[in-house]
Image (cartoon, rainbow, N blue to C red):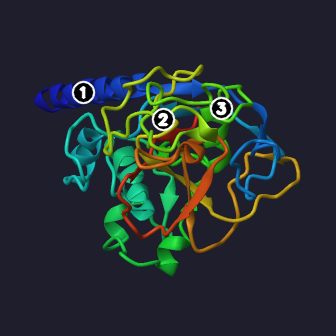
Amino acid sequence: MKKTLLLLVIFIIASALWAQRNSEMVLINGGTFTMGSPTNEPQRSASEVQHQVTVSSFYMGKYEVTQEEYEAVMGWNPSQWKGYNLPVDQVSWYDALVFCNKLSMKEGLSPVYSINGNTDPARWGTVPTERNATWNAATMVAGSNGYRLPTEAEWEYACRAGTTTPFNTGNNITINEANYNGNHPYNNNTEGTYRQKTIVVGSFTPNAWGLYDMHGNVREWCWDWYEAYSTSTQTDPTGASSGSDRVGRGGGWFSYGQNVRSAYRINGAPSYPYIGVGFRLVRATQ
């Protein structure tokens, strides 16, 4: 009887945690969009070649992963500026994989990432501080329902929320709409405050699909290797099969206005915990 009661309590607690986490995720309905930027977009990068992409539906975190969430799973907080409701930063791409699988296991979901045939981060060994061939060969387990990083295509699709302009706010973005380096506004627009640090997630109005801070605050890791786009029409692309750096999106508190555009992409060593770099979660709909 006591054992049955204990199991019931555990089930209720787990269900409550699942409901709480699920409420922090937004359903992003799939669709087709033009990824990249047009050649006449001011201050664009040559790597942003436009191409048609179709993505399937997925859930995405309303907010960047906070320090409170990260510490609850990982047991430590690497961030430069401390605050439970601030986004976690100084997280490497390798760290993000560990977090995703640990959180999935904690909530009874099937982990997405596999290294050397294992999905339990406890069996992966110490997180490398330099590029590591074994960790670079991480794969995604088909059919898993746990947490993961967004693909680059999913990230841009969700950021745009149906827009085709440089930002989901239109042709410009101000420091009242995002946390970035206001000393260097986009396309010679009016300068604004440079906060020089992260701020509480969700401080600004969300985009049309209910996602906060897709521009600025912290740059967000994506799954993909940083390589040239394929110019062909694609469905649910996951990026190149190999490379040396992974993709970062969205820019951060330190970024110039041009570098928080929806199409802007940047590379980063997967082993390095950059200041001002964090991530947000994605989960399958089934």
Mark 2, other Cα within 10 Å: few <14 / some 14–19 / many ≥20: some
Picture disc at residue 191: 2
Mark 1 element type: helix
Query: Which of pointers 2 and 3 lies earlier in the amino acid sequence?
Result: 3
**Left or right: 56 as drawn, with respect to 150:** right
Closer to the eye: label 2 or 3? 2
Query: Which of pointers 1 and 3 lies earlier in the amino acid sequence?
Result: 1
Which amino acid type is shown beneath numbered disc 1?
Ile
Mark 3 element type: helix
Mark 3, other Cα within 10 Å: few <14 / some 14–19 / many ≥20: many
Query: Which residue sits at x=37%, y=40%?
Result: 194
Mark 1, other Cα within 10 Å: few <14 / some 14–19 / many ≥20: few
Residue 166, horizontal then vertical, whole percent? 68, 36
Query: Which residue sits at x=42%, y=23%?
Result: 204
Q: Is residue 251 above or below residue 47?
A: above
Query: Which of pointers 1 and 2 lies earlier in the amino acid sequence?
Result: 1
Measure the C-alpha gap from mark 2 to mark 3.
24 Å
The residue carrying mark 3 is 160
Q: Is residue 123 above or below residue 17?
A: below
The residue carrying mark 1 is 13
Residue furthest out toward the left:
2
Which amino acid type is shown beneath numbered disc 2?
Glu
Closer to the eye: label 1 or 3? 3
**Left or right: 279 as drawn, with respect to 85:** right
Is there CB contact under 8 Å for labels 2 and 3?
A: no
Residue 221, horizontal then vertical, whole percent? 50, 53
Q: Is residue 159 above or below residue 78?
A: above
